[in-house]
């Protein structure tokens, strides 16, 4: 009887979850693109023979109900490749900086048949990586200033600290008629600290992928697309929003959500310091330490903290939500999880409040500008990450991972 009751409770929960699934309120009726990256390759080949994209299809946006709040979502399928290529046929996308985002966004835009060039410090690490990815010095790879001069859309993907440091040199090159693009609100919003004040005669837009540049690339290659935020800071042409959405598609976004530069930078700095990176490392470590203090072996402590989370339970949250993950676990686990969740929530809200304030008042920005503005920033970051790499929890993890059937050496 008990198990029947619990099964019907699970069913009820699942039904509630189904009812809460975002519903399309209005949408243009157009088929979804199955595999954009494959289509991209074909379209590049056929580029010269395609008819003008502006005659294709109807522009459409979706208004979706997100848990009771209606929000607008822009979709890739409103921008078939031919239309995208036609839209940017007179443009050169000068992508400045070749870190994680430069790599993902640059390669995707190139595969989508757009005219992309890269601008980075000559002979630096990024220059070397760009060559490895097929960008050719003097043809598609240039020193920063030269690339900006050649570009019509200047995509500033330098590190946030470098955007501020290089601004006095690059600002005069961003002349009337060009478009200035960012993937973070950082430089523009915290202008007192960064001194980045865009010229008043150019469109200033943002497309911020909500994920690592590595994933921007892999999702695109799988024919999917990353979620991105889009925003307009300055619209001198009246086309800034449309251009931002088109660029979002060009760099590999599947769906794009409205934001402002301010909201993007606050949420992004907060999220990465919180659950996405800082909090998760802190929480894993705390749980592991207590297990070790109580006599559990490194493998047991790692398996119970990280391996089970990342390999079994978190993918279930990603697939179908938190209640689905709970329902996939024992009733014993469900009872305990339900009891302890509010305890963790209560303990953590004050820390998250403190974090949000530290983001909003610019403390986090100033720290980042100081640290990442050092000439030794790569070495200094690597030294601190090496400390994490050497923590017992992560050393134990290497051995646990080495036992996976699909294990490949991690030194590559
Ligand atoms: N990483 C991500 O996944 C995400 C990043 N963003 C945003 O995208 C932008 C780019 O981030 P990301 O790709 O991570 O890049 P990084 O923060 O890793 O910056 C790397 C680039 O900055 C260059 N750089 C650093 N210092 C200088 C300097 N003093 N002068 C000239 N160039 C310099 C590097 O060149 P060199 O090799 O020559 O040092 C490299 O090309 C940022 O605004 C970031 O916040 C947004 C979403 C996600
Ligand atoms: C989570 C970190 C991030 O904000 C990102 C990948 O979205 C970043 O700045 O790299
Ligand atoms: Mg982010
Ligand atoms: Mg970020």
Image: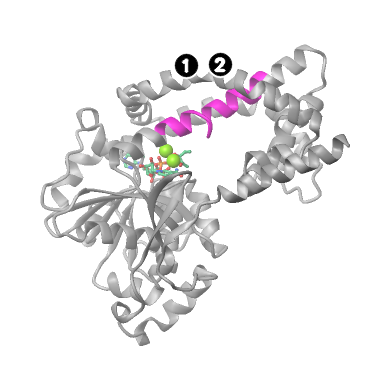
Q: Residue 279 lies in what quarter of the image? A: top right
Magenta portion: prevailing SS class: helix
Q: Can you give x and y, in whole percent of width and height, for residue 96 in the image?
A: 32, 51
Based on the picture, tell me whether residue 284 belongs to the magenta stretch: yes
Q: Residues within 10 Å of mark 1 (few under 14, many from 20)?
A: few
Q: Residue 142 lies in what quarter of the image? A: bottom left
Q: Residue drawn at (33%, 59%), measured in percent from left and top?
A: 245
Give the total number of marks visible in the rendering: 2
Q: CA distance from mark 1 to mark 2?
A: 7 Å
Q: Can you give x and y, in whole percent of width and height, for residue 209 in the image?
A: 42, 49
Front residue of 304 and 332: 332
Q: Which mark is residue 350?
A: 1
Q: Considering only vertical position in the picture, is 353 above or below 187?
A: above
Q: Considering only vertical position in the picture, is 243 above or below 312?
A: below
Q: Residue drawn at (50%, 56%), measured in percent from left and top?
A: 217
Based on the picture, tell me whether residue 138 belongs to the magenta stretch: no
Q: Can you give x and y, in whole percent of width and height, for residue 241 in the image?
A: 26, 57
Residues in magenta, as a range = 269-286
Residue at the right extreme, as displayed: 1
Residue at the bottom extreme, as displayed: 49
Observer able to see residue 253? no
Mark 2: which secondary structure? helix
Which residue in the protein does label 2 denote?
Answer: 347
Q: Quadrant of ligand 3?
A: top left
Q: Are marks 1 and 2 in contact (CB under 8 Å)?
A: yes
Observer able to see residue 156? yes
Front residue of 4 and 409: 4
Q: Residue drawn at (17%, 52%), measured in percent from left and top?
A: 174
Q: Is mark 2 within 8 Å of ligand 2?
A: no
Q: Which mark is residue 409?
A: none
Quarter that holds the N terminus: top right
Q: Can you give x and y, in whole percent of width and height, for residue 81 in the image?
A: 40, 73
């Amino acid at each position: 009887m008990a198990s029947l009751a619990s099964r019907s409770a699970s069913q009820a929960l699942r039904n509630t979850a189904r009812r809460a699934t975002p519903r399309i309120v209005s949408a243009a009726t157009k088929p979804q693109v199955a595999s954009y990256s494959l289509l991209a390759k074909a379209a590049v080949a056929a580029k010269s023979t395609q008819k003008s994209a502006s005659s294709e299809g109807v522009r459409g946006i979706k208004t979706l109900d997100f848990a009771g709040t209606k929000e607008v979502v822009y979709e890739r399928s409103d921008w078939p490749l031919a239309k995208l290529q036609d839209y940017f046929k007179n443009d050169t996308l000068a992508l400045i900086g070749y870190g994680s985002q430069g790599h993902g966004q640059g390669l995707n835009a190139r595969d989508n048949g757009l005219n992309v060039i890269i601008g980075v410090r000559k002979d630096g690490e990024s220059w070397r990586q760009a060559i490895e990815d097929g960008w050719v010095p003097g043809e598609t790879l240039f020193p920063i200033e030269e690339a900006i001069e050649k570009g019509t859309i200047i995509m500033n993907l330098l590190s946030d600290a470098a955007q501020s440091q290089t601004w006095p040199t690059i600002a005069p090159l961003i002349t009337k008629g060009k478009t200035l693009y960012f993937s973070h609100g950082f430089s523009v919003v915290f202008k007192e600290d960064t001194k980045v004040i865009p010229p008043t005669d150019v469109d200033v837009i943002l497309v911020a992928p909500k994920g690592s540049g590595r994933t921007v690339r892999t999702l695109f290659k799988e024919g999917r697309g990353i979620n991105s935020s889009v925003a307009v800071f300055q619209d001198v042409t009246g086309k800034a929003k449309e251009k931002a959405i088109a660029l979002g598609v060009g760099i590999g976004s599947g769906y794009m959500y409205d934001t402002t530069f301010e909201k993007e930078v606050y949420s992004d700095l907060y999220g990465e310091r919180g659950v996405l990176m800082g909090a998760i490392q802190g929480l894993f470590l705390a749980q592991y330490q207590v297990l070790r203090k109580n006599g559990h072996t490194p493998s047991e402590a790692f398996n119970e903290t990280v391996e089970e989370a990342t390999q079994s339970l978190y993918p279930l949250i990603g697939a179908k939500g938190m209640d689905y993950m709970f329902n996939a676990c024992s009733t014993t686990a469900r009872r305990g999880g339900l009891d302890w969740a509010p305890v963790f929530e209560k303990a953590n809200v004050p820390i998250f409040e403190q974090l949000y304030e530290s983001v909003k008042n610019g403390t986090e920005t100033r720290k980042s500008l100081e640290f990442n503005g050092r000439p030794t920033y790569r070495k200094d970051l690597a030294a601190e990450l090496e400390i994490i790499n050497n923590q017992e929890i992560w050393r134990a993890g290497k051995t646990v991972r080495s036992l996976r059937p699909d294990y490949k050496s991690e030194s590559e």
